[in-house]
Image: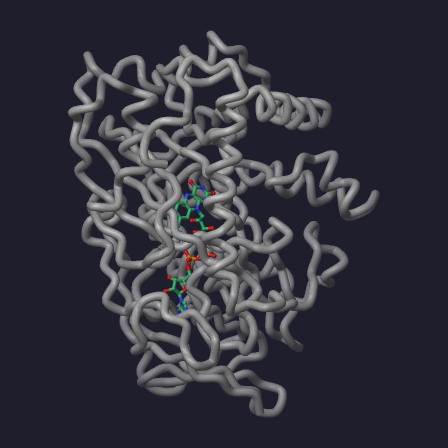
Amino acid sequence: MICCKPNFNARAFDYDEQHLYVFNMHEQLSSCLWANTAAPDLQAIPLQGAISADVIIVGAGFTGCAAALALAQRGARVALLEAKSVGWGASGRTGGQVIPGLKYDPDELEAMLGPDLGPRMVTAVGGVGDEVFGLIERHAISCDAQRKGWLQPAYSTKSLDLALRRCDSWKRRGANVSAIDQSRMAQLLGTEHYLGGWEDRRAGHVQPMSYVRGVAIAAQRAGAVIHTESPALALTKQGAKWRVATPKGSVDSDQVLIATNGYTDGLWPGLARTIVPMMSFQAATVPIPEAMGKHILPEGHAASDTRRLLWYFRRDAHGRLIMGGRAPYREDLGAGDDNYVRTAVNRLYPQLNNTPFEFHWAGRVAMTQDHLPHLHQLDKGLWTAMGYNGRGVGMATLLGRLLSDLALGVSPKDIPFPVTSMQPIFGYPFTRLVARALVSYYRLRDELEAAGSTTKYPHTEGPL
Ligand SMILES: Cc1cc2nc3c(=O)[nH]c(=O)nc-3n(C[C@H](O)[C@H](O)[C@H](O)COP(=O)(O)OP(=O)(O)OC[C@H]3O[C@@H](n4cnc5c(N)ncnc54)[C@H](O)[C@@H]3O)c2cc1C
């Protein structure tokens, strides 16, 4: 019998005696734009008593909800267990940018994965825009969905070369992308900060809390049972069946999907040590008056630049500017931690110097050592997908569906993504130190690279 009990009472982001990250049960979403402007939450109650299902899913973000919907639509009995509320993890806190592709270019992915899996994976990760916007359309999910493209503006000559190579790599495969020169980029962003870059018209943005709630409601309509405030406390094997215990109940099933990403606890030994949770912070201005804001992202793009510690930004449906970026490695971040994103707003859009932030929030981005998301078989009938490296709106929706295929018996070799075994990171207790060191190193590299480029605004001043 395999059993592990996470400690839900420890302090935020502490490292507990089992060397596992635990999360702060008091952390609130009250200052998050998305929680304050989302479509109504679904009806769900904590699990009480013993039930059975074909598939148990742990975690109700994009991964878990997409898996629940795909399974329920094919007639599986699904029990989705969420420790807090639907979208409480990263899914309800993202920038909502739906971006096809991964850190690696299609050429690199194909070289890494070979002539069979490589092209299938490139097609799958390039298609996440269709995955998300198709789901939204089919289930009439009201989430301010805008498919007006994504821009990757380059802050240095070196990163401009990389961006143009990436664009070319997608273009050769027929993707709807184009290179953007410096003056057109300035027009599309409303700032002359960048040297040019590329545009991906397969992309867009959504109100992420409304989106995840919409997928969960569609899953409920298809027959999935969702229990919120129901942390999975123990996962055990009882003969051929899995059993997940919650504070007031339990579920037995043949298959279990763990969909906890950056909020992974000790439910499955070693799993939390396969990813490094990093904090990302966002702030949203008050709605910007038309006269002041009409040149800021006038065509409705989402954008994330080429910095290693990137700035990502977009408007919301009410005309606010949302800016995101790195944050200190703490979980109790608040309004006082907005200096990085304030600097970014002021540099890109000096006309907003005196425009206050109305909302601020932060969440965990799950990074992996190889910069790829991971789809693991943990045991017979036990699967997980995680480690989206900041590209989870599209990728988690896709991998949630692929998890549902695996749970229904599709062979891993027929999945357009590598299905691997779990490999905890060597020397994991030191990853926080390494991550801090890496942030300082990346900051320096970003500054040096920008200083060596012909940018209109040097990047060396300010509290970065
Ligand atoms: C600030 C921020 C900005 C981002 N911006 C973008 C962006 O613009 N575009 C993009 O593509 N990606 C972005 N990302 C990444 C993206 O949000 C994530 O990759 C994605 O939401 C992951 O979804 P998920 O369902 O796998 O995990 P999550 O949404 O984190 O859900 C995991 C859930 O598991 C639950 N859980 C954990 N343990 C248990 C347990 N034992 N029992 C029951 N439930 C449990 C948690 O409560 C949580 O709700 C961003 C992330 C952050 C934090």
Q: Position of residue 42 (x, y in %)?
A: 28, 58
Name the quarter where the C terminus is drawn. top left
Q: Position of residue 176 (x, y in %)?
A: 60, 23
Q: From the viewer's perspective, tell me whether residue 319 is left or right of residue 244.
A: left
The picture quadrant where one finds residue 320 is top left
432 is higher (above) or lower (below) than 357:
below
Name the quarter where the N terminus is drawn. bottom right
**Closest to the observer, 419 or 69:** 419
Number of residue marks: 0
Q: How is the image coloured?
A: one colour
Residue found 54% across the figure and 27% down from its top: 449
Residue found 48% across the figure and 46% down from its top: 390
Q: Position of residue 380 (x, y in %)?
A: 66, 77
253 is higher (above) or lower (below) than 441:
below
Residue found 46% across the figure and 44% down from its top: 440
**Closest to the observer, 120 or 52:** 120
The picture quadrant where one finds residue 426 is bottom right
The picture quadrant where one finds residue 282 is top left
**Closest to the observer, 232 or 25:** 25
Q: Is residue 302 something one can see in this rendering?
A: yes
Q: Is residue 39 something one can see in this rendering?
A: no
Q: Residue furthest top?
A: 183
The image quadrant where one finds ligand 1 is: bottom left
Q: From the viewer's perspective, tell me whether residue 344 is left or right of residue 389.
A: left
24 is higher (above) or lower (below) than 40:
below
Q: Position of residue 170 (x, y in %)?
A: 67, 27
Residue found 67% across the figure and 24% down from its top: 165
Q: Residue furthest right?
A: 115
